[in-house]
Amino acid sequence: MKPVGGFTLLELLVAVAIFAVVGAMAYSGLRNIMNQQAQTEAHSERLKDLQLAYRVIQRDLEQIVDREIRNEFGDPVDALVGGSGFTGVEFSRAGYPNPAGFLRSELQRVAYVPDQDQLIRRTWRVMDRAQDSQPDEQVLIAQLHEFSMRFLGEDKEWQERWPALTQAQGSATGLPLAIEVTVELDDVGVLTWLFRLPSSYRAASPPAGEAAEAGAPE
C-alpha cells in the first residue's frame, strides 16, 4: 500500500510561525498607513478651518467703516479699538446682510476676542448697544496660544494699539492703512496675515425709517 503524504507537526509549527510573522508585518504596515491617513485628514481639516478664519477676517476688515458707536453705558467708542487696554479688537463694518428687509442698519459691530485657547468672533445686532444687548459668538480658531494685531498709521509707522498713543488730542481718530494679524497656534506655529484696509470708508447712515423720523420733508 502506497503511503499517504502529509505534513509533520514540526512543518505545521514552522508554517504557522511564518504566517504569524507575515501577518504581524502586514498589520503594522496597514496600521501605519491608517495613522498617516488620519493625520493627513486632520491636517486637511485644520488647514480648511484656518483658511475659513482668514477669509472671515479679511471680509470683515475689507468692509470696515469709520463709524463710532455707544456702548452699554452710553459712552462713545471709536470705530476701531484694539491693543493695550482692550483684549482683542472691535470695529464697525458694512455689508451686514438684511434679506428680510428689517428696519435696521446694514452696518455691524464686530469683535475678535481671545478666550483661553480659542479666538471668538462676536457680532452685535445693533450698532449703539443697550444694557441688555448681547453679542452672538462664533469660535473662529481653536488651539490658540496667542492673538495680536498691529496697526499701520498714516505716518507709515506700526502701532501696537488703536487709537494710537500719538493721536493728537481732539483730532479725528480715523482708521489705519493696514492691519497685521498674528496668531500663534499650538499645532501649526505662528501665522502672520496682513490686510490692507480700503482707501475710502463709506460714511454710516441710519436706516430709512430712522431717517424719515429724523425730519425728512413730507
Image (cartoon, grey):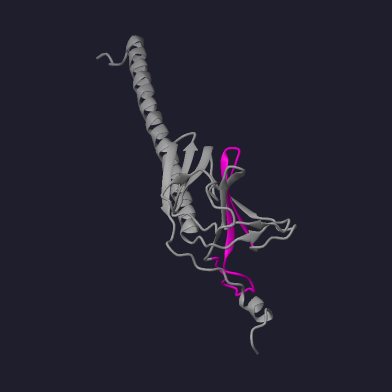
Q: Name the side, left or right, on which 13 lies relative to 114.
A: left
**From where the camera sits, is residue 156 visible?**
yes
**Where does the image place residue 29, in percent across and percent down from the top left?**
36, 27
Outermost residue, left side: 2
Q: Name the side, left or right, on which 189 lies relative to 208.
A: left
* Magenta segment boundaries in residue numbering: 96-125
* Residue at 60% from the left image edge and 75% from the top image edge: 101
Q: Looking at the figure, which quarter contains the N terminus?
A: top left
Q: Looking at the figure, which quarter contains the C terminus?
A: bottom right
Quadrant position of residue 92: bottom right
**Where does the image place residue 64, in percent across and percent down from the top left?**
50, 60
* Magenta stretch contains residue 66: no
Nearer to the camera, 175 or 132? 175
Q: Name the side, left or right, on which 30 lies relative to 4.
A: right
Q: Name the side, left or right, on which 9 lies relative to 186.
A: left
* Magenta stretch contains residue 117: yes
* Residue at 48% from the left image edge and 37% from the top image edge: 184
39 lies above or below 133: above
* Residue at 57% from the left image edge and 41% from the top image edge: 118
**Where does the image place residue 189, in percent across and percent down from the top left?**
44, 35
217 lies above or below 170: below
Outermost residue, front side: 169
**From where the camera sits, is residue 120 visible?**
no
